[in-house]
Structure formats: structure tokens, C-alpha cells
Amino acid sequence: QVRLAESGGGLVQAGDSLTLSCAMSGRTFTSAYWFRQPPGKEREYVAAISWSGAVQQYAASVKGRFTISRDSAKNTISLQMNNLKPDDTAVYFCASGRGGPAAVLDNGVWGQGTQVTVSS
């Protein structure tokens, strides 16, 4: 059974950078995702990476600022976040599953989340 555990969240200032990590236990041959849930809002898609790591996709709100990567040897997923904005404040979750972001929201395997707070 696949289990996911996020780490690396914290309190930063606008313009700062932060890297989140997701440790994956158990073998998975599916795409991996980062989602986030801002305070009082629905969970939203942030980024995805294919099983091979060759394909990355991003939500428009983070494209050019965030980078998703995969270390298959360590079985980890990372999210490098640059030029952070107060609107990036959210609980960040990694997830794994098939069928794209909408399917993973319903049926994916999820970590417990890590809080990122960006002050202005």
C-alpha cells in the first residue's frame, strides 16, 4: 500500500522560496501531484509529474514560479516554490493516482498535508 508524507512547509515572506518534499513508501507506477487548499476554499490542483518524470504540468497560477520534480531512486516528489505570494498560503498535499487531477481528487492516495504561510 502506498503512503505519502509531506514535509518542508513553514512561514515565509512574499518573494521567498520554499521546497516541499513528499516521501512515498511503497512502489507506485502512476503520476504524482501537488494540490493545495487555501483557507476557506476548495482543494485545488497545483502541479503534476508523470511516473517517468519526463512530463510536468502546472496550474496557470503557479507556472513559471513552481517546479515539480521526482527522484525515483529516493521515491520522493518535490515542489520548488519561488517568488511566493500571499495567495500561495495554503495546506499543500501530495497525491498519487491515475486518471488526472479530477480523478485523483476523488480516488487518489493522499498525504496529510503541510502548511505554507506567506506573509506580505
Image (spheres, rainbow, N blue to C red):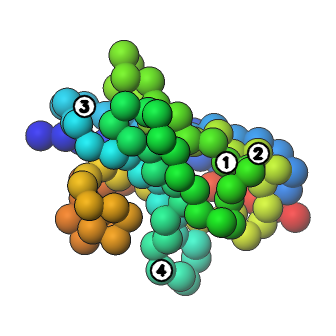
Q: How many marks?
A: 4
Q: Is residue 101 left or right of residue 69?
A: left
Label 2 CA crowd tier, 10 Å (few <14, some 14–19, many 20+): some
Residue linked to disc 1: 66
Label 2: state its secondary structure.
loop
Label 3: state its secondary structure.
strand
x then y, percent, for residue 49: 44, 44
* Kind of residue sitting beneath label 2: Asn
Q: Residue 42 got which mark?
A: 4
- Looking at the image, which residue is at 49% across and 65% down? 45
Residue linked to disc 2: 82
Label 4: state its secondary structure.
loop
* Kind of residue sitting beneath label 1: Phe
**Res. 87 visible in picture:** yes
- View extreme (front): residue: 54
Judging depth in this view, the residue of 14 and 71 nearest the camera is 71
**Answer yes or no: do the residues labelled 4 and 3 have beta carbons within 8 Å?**
no
Residue linked to disc 3: 25
**Answer yes or no: do the residues labelled 2 and 3 have beta carbons within 8 Å?**
no
* Kind of residue sitting beneath label 4: Glu
Q: Earlier in the sequence, mark 4 or mark 3?
A: 3
**Answer yes or no: do the residues labelled 1 and 2 have beta carbons within 8 Å?**
yes
Label 1: state its secondary structure.
strand
Query: How far is mark 1 from mark 4, CA to CA?
Result: 20 Å
Query: How far is mark 4 from mark 3, CA to CA?
Result: 27 Å
Label 3 CA crowd tier, 10 Å (few <14, some 14–19, many 20+): some
**Answer yes or no: do the residues labelled 1 and 4 have beta carbons within 8 Å?**
no
Judging depth in this view, the residue of 52 and 1 nearest the camera is 52
Query: How far is mark 1 from mark 3, CA to CA?
Result: 24 Å
